[in-house]
Every structure is written in structure tokens, then in C-alpha cells.
Amino acid sequence: MRQKSAKQLFAALAVLVLMVATGCALAPRASDSAGQTQDRGGSSKSAAEPGATAQPGEPAPMPSDVAAGLRPYYEQKLKWVKCTSGASFQCAALRVPLDYRQPEGKSIELAVLRLPARDRAKRLGSLVINPGGPGGSGVEYAAAAPWVVSKPVIARYDIVGFDPRGVGKSAPVDCLTDKQMDHYLAIDGSPDNATEQNNLMKEARFFANGCKARSGAVLGHVSTEDAARDMDVLRSALGDKKLTYLGKSYGTFLGATYAGLFPQRAGRLVLDGAIDPTLSARALGLEQAKGFEVALRAFIQDCVSRKDCPLGSSVSEAYRTIDNFLARTDQNPLKTNDGSRKLTQSLAITGIIMPLYVKEYWPRLRTAMRSALAGDGSRLLSLADEYVERNPDGTYRNNSGEAIVAVNCLDRPDLKSVAQAKAEEPTFEKASPRFGSYILWGSLSCAAWPFKATGRPGPIHAKGAPPILVIGTTRDPATPYDWAVRLAKQLDSGVLLTRDGDGHTGYMQGNQCVDRAVERFLIDGKPPRSGTECPEG
């Protein structure tokens, strides 16, 4: 595979399922206008167009099931202006109700960005994209469209990204100052005794209280279901009868939720790096921990095959090296070139996790581990900072580390107490000796959350939706392959596409088999046969 450019790597890392020391781990949560029908296996009976209106920019026809109080939102016209992302990009603000149960009440605005289709004569409509998170900026993701979406798709679709409510420029959740966030990310995320456990609970309360004080009413309305309802308002404002969508990582849960709510308005949906919506927060965290262990083993096997591997010459030796290193940093954090910060165990784990998402970053992890084993934590700290999007000047590029907790705690009931975490710890440590405890205790913030969870785990069938393409990568560290298998089976019209490989997600990761399958589906309406496998490379 060719080396990726910096922008390509940025686009790949934008799909991270973010995980912080005291934040929740992972939350998850066709037949179109021309009448195309397809079977689950993917054989197309006609290559119909996506459901775009004849005049883009005009609201789509009003569905009969839209409540009267929501009609003004569905009828709005977006006012597009040039924006700072580049001459080709346009920006707008979408107005949505803060509370869909009371649409006549307060409203908020969501930031939207689009790259108009290059071939206007053959434009198919809008492709809404989401990078994951929760907490990832769709605006930033769409601004990286040339590295996120392939050229044939960019030619035929307007590429549209929006910051989900609570994220980025869309009524953003705010919880901590930058210095407070530095402290929050560095504290011991895998406590060894009662004192450390109670301290972690104290920090979780401080975080939750900060969110409530600094974010206001929006904090209780940033669930995935809220965001999915926003996408239907966006679909209408874009002038599309059906939603065409590409979601990665958490974005697959957002897309599946949309399909479950609005199967009759689902168009061509691509869900890449899928999340199984039936899993509880506990089960998601446990399986994600296992996924990182699988990815770490793949990295170690590659490392020990090289003469310059800093971890040793065998897999067993490499594991011992990493385990001893993490134990030492727990007791004695490493110095770094940032005089005010040391590499704690939590930051070290974050720094190790980050390169596991993208195989091209494995050389950086080898270099960082070599330095760390020699006593300098600077390179590993740099990787951790990239993961949480911390700038060199100490500011944070966005609020993703805060938004992820806010969304996760609403989407699924999670840990309720320190006692519950202690009871679960042996199971997590057995499943994942390096990451299990870290991921488990990371869910403690939800125990102190000021709002009750509004979501519940459960299957999504999306009965009546056209074929939905689900992509799974066999050694995906953040969204294990089995999740894609399960989601494709749950969905009445799910079509599974497998990528054999390392790293997070499959589309635009250098695998032409996957890329061509997605292009054919989005452009021609022809999904691959369910169960199609794309070999590594």
C-alpha cells in the first residue's frame, strides 16, 4: 500500500471512537424515487437514481408523518455562503428544535458545510457524511472530502458534513478549561486501590458538574436519536427525498438509528466500521477492549519481525516489555519535553492506542516506544495529544473529548458506582490485560451524570429500507469485525462487505475492492452480494 499523505491520515484518524481516561468508552449508539428494488444479496433489478429533488436548494416534499410543530423546520431553506475551508466549500446553518417533544420551544443551530458535486450535469443529490466519535466534526470531515470520499463519488454528489448537536460549532457541550482537560486526561485511569478509585469518582463528579454548569439545557438533548432526527431535517433542507449517507465508526450507529426511525426515507446508506446497537455499554466496552488487544498483537507480530523492534525479538518478550513499561509509568511517570507535563500511565495507554487505528502509524509507535523505554515520554505524549486533538500551545482543537461523554451517557445506561466497577474489573482484565481496566473505569463519568440515559440497547431492523451496506474490517481495533456481522444480520436489508486487514474502517483505506464496491453502490445503486470479502491490499 502506498504511504498516505498527512491529509489522508488526518481523514483516517477523524473516524476515531474517542476514549478518554474518565470518559465513557464507546457509545453507540435502494427503493428510491425511481422505484428500485433489490434483494438482500445485492443483485440489482434496476439502477435507479437517489431521491434528489429536481431543484436542489428547495426543501424536499413534506412527508405526511411530520408533526405540525416540526413543519417550519422541514420547510426551511439553507442560506449558503462561502466559508474559510476553501473556495469550493459553502457553509450554512440549519435550525432544529432543542427538544423534539416540544418543537415549538427553543431552537438551536447546527453548522453545515458542503462541497458541490463536480459534475453538475450528472449530480445525484447530497451525500451526508459523519466521521464517528461521538464528538467528531462532520464539518471538518467534509472539508477533507478529497481524502474521505473517492473522486467518482465527489463528481456525482454534493458532499455534506454537519456538526451534530453538542459538537464543534453546533451548540457545543463545554465542561472544562484546557488546563483542567490536561489534568483530566492524565489522571490514573486504572486505579489500584480505594484511594485512587475514590479520586477517580471525584474527578468524574467534577467533570459532570462542569458540563452542567457550562453547557446549559443542551446537555440533556445531545443523544444519538436527537442527532438522527436532525439528519432528517437536514435531508429535507438539502432538497433530498431520501437520505444518502456515509457513516464511519460511531457514525454507523447514527446512520442505523436514522434508518430505524425513518426507513421510508432511507436511501443509499453506507455504514463502515459498524457498531452493534444491541450491546449494552458494558458489552461494548468489553468487546472494544478485546479489539485493541487484537490490534496490539498484530502490531507486535509486525514489530518483532523487524531487526530494530524496541520491544524484543519474540511476541512473548514484547508483551513483557509493554506490561513492565506500563507498570513503571503507573508508579513513576516519564519526563517529556513539555516541562509542565509528564507521561502518566493513562497518557501512555492513549499514546499506544492512537497508532493502532492506522497501520501506517506503526513505525511512529515503534519510535515512540524506543524513546519511552529509554526514559523519554515525549514521542508517546505527542501521539496521545494527537488522539485527543490537543494543540502544541495547550489548547484543544475541538470539544470532542467532552461531547463523547455527553452523548454516551445519554445513549446507554452505564456504570452506577465504584463498587460496580470493582466487581466488573476481573472480567475486563481477563479479556484485555492491557486495556480492559482502563476502558472499564473510563465509564465512571456516567455514574455522576446529571441527566438520565434516554436510550436503551436493542436491535435495529429498519423494515422497509432499501439495501444498507455494512462494512467490517477483520482486525479493526475500535469496532470489532463481529459488530459489522451482527448489524448486517439485524437490518432487514443489511448487506455485509468484509475487508481483510488492519486499522479502523474499510472505505478509502487503500483497498480498491472496498472502494469500488462503495462507488458502485452509491453511484449505480448496486450493492455487492452480501458476504463479499475483499482481501488485504
Image: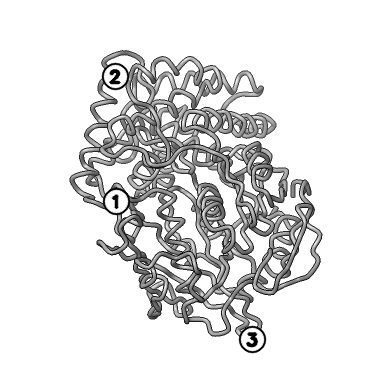
At 56% from the left and 21% from the top, the residue drawn is 431
Q: Amino acid at mark 3?
A: Ala
Badge 2 vs badge 1, beta-carbon distance below 8 Å:
no
* SS at badge 3: helix
Residue 195 falls left or right of residue 514: left
* Amino acid bearing label 1: Val
Depth check, front residue: 123 or 45:
45
Q: Which residue is mark 2?
A: 196
Which numbered mark, 2 or 1, is in the foreground of this view? 1
Counting from the top left corner in percent of width and height, residue 142 is at 49, 65
User: Which percent across, then down, holds residue 271?
Assistant: 60, 52
Mark positioned earlier in the residue sequence (1 or 3): 3
Q: What amino acid is at disc 2?
A: Glu
Closer mark to the observer between disc 3 and disc 2 = 3
Q: Which residue is mark 1?
A: 173
Which element type, helix, strand or loop, lies under badge 1?
loop
Choose between 281 and 107: the one closer to the eye: 107
Crowd class of label 2 (few under 14; some 14 to 19; many from 20; radius 10 Å): some
Task: Work out whether mark 2 precedes mark 1 in sequence or the reverse, and give the earlier one.
Answer: 1
- Secondary structure at badge 2 equals helix
- Residue 210, given in percent of the width and then of the height, sits at 21, 41
Please indicate, yes or no, whether residue 530 appears anywhere in the rendered image. Answer: yes
Residue that numbered label 3 is attached to:
121
Compared across the picture, whether 133 is left or right of 167 comes to right
Q: Residues within 10 Å of mark 3 (few under 14, many from 20)?
A: few
Q: Is residue 191 left or right of residue 14?
A: left
Viewer-proximal residue, 525 or 206? 525
| Residue drawn at point x = 50 percent, y = 24 percent | 434
